[in-house]
């Protein structure tokens, strides 16, 4: 049993690698960005608040993000699943700290590895623009919003990366490579985690 985290800037390929890992290992997914966009699409009371942040490339309020994440963890636990893959989360130290507290209540979801997908900014911007042609996401279209997301990522997530490095959980992956090569690099580390 193991749970893992994929970190990296927007456009690093987290979603692509997550899909391949889910297919091979059967991870259950927690993608806060997708969960929040669903709230926005459904125009829930939380979604109306979230839209103001997401559409401007800003990080959503901590309490709302954690409420959505905890709800999904509770659902997976009640359904008897053991392995979770967190995509692009936690992004801030406050989320890191609260996620640790939540997972202590569910020992089966212990984090075994944190994969940091490293990619240069030019590649990130190019990938997001290409994705924006088909994703329909407001935060993939505007260059100003894209730049803001990248800036916030480096400001906020660096401290999270440092925390996981201190815990000896961080594995840095060169995500400038071809998709299959990136997956092979991740998979070679995962084989050493006891995933069942």
Image (cartoon, rainbow, N blue to C red):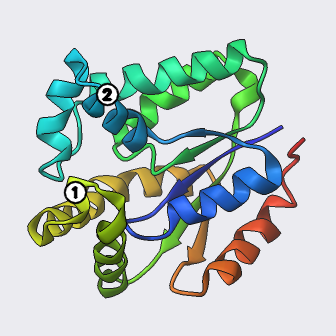
3 lies left or right of 6? right
Q: In terms of secondary structure, where does tag 2 sit?
A: helix
Local crowd at mark 2 within 10 Å, few (<14), some, or many (≥20)? some
Can you say whether 149 is above or below 92 in the image? Answer: below
Who's the residue at 12% across and 50% down the image?
56
Q: Residue 175: horizontal and vertical position, in percent?
A: 54, 78
Who's the residue at 35% across and 60% down the image?
135
Who's the residue at 29% across and 22% down the image?
63
174 lies left or right of 188? left
Q: Between residue 87 and residue 52, name the one nearer to us.
A: 52
| Quadrant of res 189 | bottom right
- The quadrant of the image that shows the C terminus is top right
Q: Residue 142: horizontal and vertical position, in percent?
A: 13, 66
Q: Residue 180: horizontal and vertical position, in percent?
A: 69, 80
74 lies left or right of 99? right
Q: In terms of secondary structure, where does tag 1 sit?
A: helix
Residue under pointer 2: 39
Who's the residue at 41% across and 50% down the image?
160
Q: Residue 172: horizontal and vertical position, in percent?
A: 58, 71
Picture disc at residue 98: none
Residue 141: tell me if it is visible: yes
Residue under pointer 1: 139
């Amino acid at each position: 049993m193991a749970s893992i985290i994929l970190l990296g800037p927007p456009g690093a390929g987290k979603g692509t690698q997550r899909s391949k890992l889910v297919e091979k290992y059967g991870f259950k997914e927690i993608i806060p960005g997708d969960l929040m966009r669903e709230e926005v699409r459904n125009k829930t009371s939380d979604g109306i608040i979230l839209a103001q942040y997401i559409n401007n490339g800003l990080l959503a309020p901590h309490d709302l993000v954690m409420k959505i994440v905890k709800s999904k963890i509770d659902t997976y636990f009640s359904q008897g699943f053991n392995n979770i893959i967190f995509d692009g989360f936690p992004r801030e130290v406050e989320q890191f700290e609260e996620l640790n507290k939540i997972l202590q209540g569910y020992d089966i979801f212990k984090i075994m590895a944190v994969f940091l997908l490293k990619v240069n900014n030019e590649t990130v911007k190019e990938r997001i623009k290409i994705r924006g042609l088909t994703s329909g996401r407001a935060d993939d279209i505007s260059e100003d919003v894209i730049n803001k997301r990248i800036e916030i990522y480096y400001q906020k997530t660096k401290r999270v990366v440092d925390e996981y490095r201190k815990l000896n959980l961080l594995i840095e992956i060169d995500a400038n490579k071809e998709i299959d090569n990136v997956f092979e690099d991740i998979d070679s580390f995962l084989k050493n985690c006891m995933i069942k």
